[in-house]
Image (spheres, helix red, strand yellow):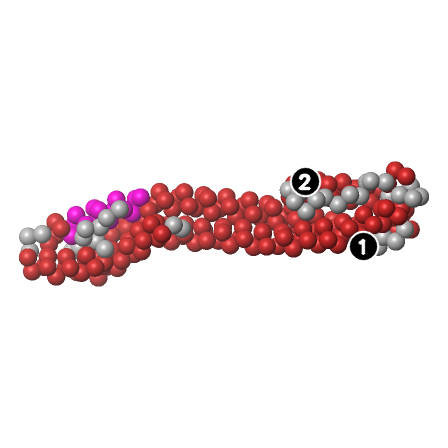
Amino acid sequence: MNAQLRRRLEMAGRVREFLRAHKTDGVGEGLGLAKLEELVQRAEVLASQQREGVVAARSATTRRRKVRRALQSKLLLYLRAVGAVAAKETAELAEQFQVPPSNASHEALLTMARGMLEKATLHKDVLVKRGMSEQLLGDLALALGELEQTIEATRAGKREHIGASADLEAVAAEIAEQVKVLDGLVRYRFGDDAGADGRVGQRAERAGTVQAQD
């Protein structure tokens, strides 16, 4: 959430509390306050969704880094080493187990690693004979599945964040309009009452109602 949007929502919260406190004066009566209450609640839900999207995307990114390190520095290196030995017996395995570069995209890493897994599964007996642990293929499959899940989790988190942000901007614009209406109500209700205007106007200004700016 950017600073301008945060200030606008904080101002709306202050306006809401001010009007709640002045219901007995007639300021907070009617649909005006109810509409603002609805908009502020909606904004709070969207702000929460926005934060959750960011947290989910960051969490998936952190986990993906760990999975990539395990793939490139352990699982695939082990498979490549065994493949190089097995190639002495089975020529077709030569150059079949090349570790993707460290800067490979997530999609490229998935594609290349799945290809290596497929070849290793096909030649499992030869590779096991040359020193490959039978558990390696299962661990490799699990790691690739987890990598794929983290990619989708990041995309989903970003979608949630972007969607909530767009909706939040729209709700904030409605809030700004409603605050103007309520500001007009304060002026209309107390404009001709100098004493009340001085008392309520001062408190409303502190709450961010009178003279509210976009």
The crowd level at tag 1 (other Cα within 10 Å; few <14, some 14-19, many 20+) is few
Instruction: Name the magenta segment's main secondary structure.
Output: helix
**Residue 158 appears left or right of 125:** left
How many marks do you count on the picture? 2
Residue type at the position of mark 1: Gln
Q: Which residues are magenta?
A: 173-186
Residue type at the position of mark 2: Ala
**Magenta stretch containing residue 180, yes or no?**
yes
Q: Position of residue 78 (x, y in %)?
A: 80, 52
In the image, which is nearer the foreground, mark 1 or mark 2?
2
Q: Position of residue 157 (x, y in %)?
A: 52, 48
**Residue 147 appears left or right of 157:** right
Q: Position of residue 183 (x, y in %)?
A: 19, 50
Q: Nearer the viewer, residue 12 or 45?
A: 12
**Magenta stretch containing residue 130, yes or no?**
no
**Residue 199 appears left or right of 213:** left
**Residue 167 appears left or right of 61:** left
What secondary structure is marked by label 2?
A: helix
Measuring 78% from the left and 43% from the top, which residue is drawn there? 98
Inspect this view and state whether residue 12 appears: yes
Measuring 46% from the left and 44% from the top, which residue is drawn there? 162
What secondary structure is marked by label 1?
A: helix
Inspect this view and state whether residue 9 appears: no
Q: Are marks 1 and 2 in contact (CB under 8 Å)?
A: no
Q: Position of residue 100 (x, y in %)?
A: 72, 44
Which residue in the structure is indicated by mark 2?
Answer: 108
The crowd level at tag 2 (other Cα within 10 Å; few <14, some 14-19, many 20+) is few
Residue 135 has which mark? 1
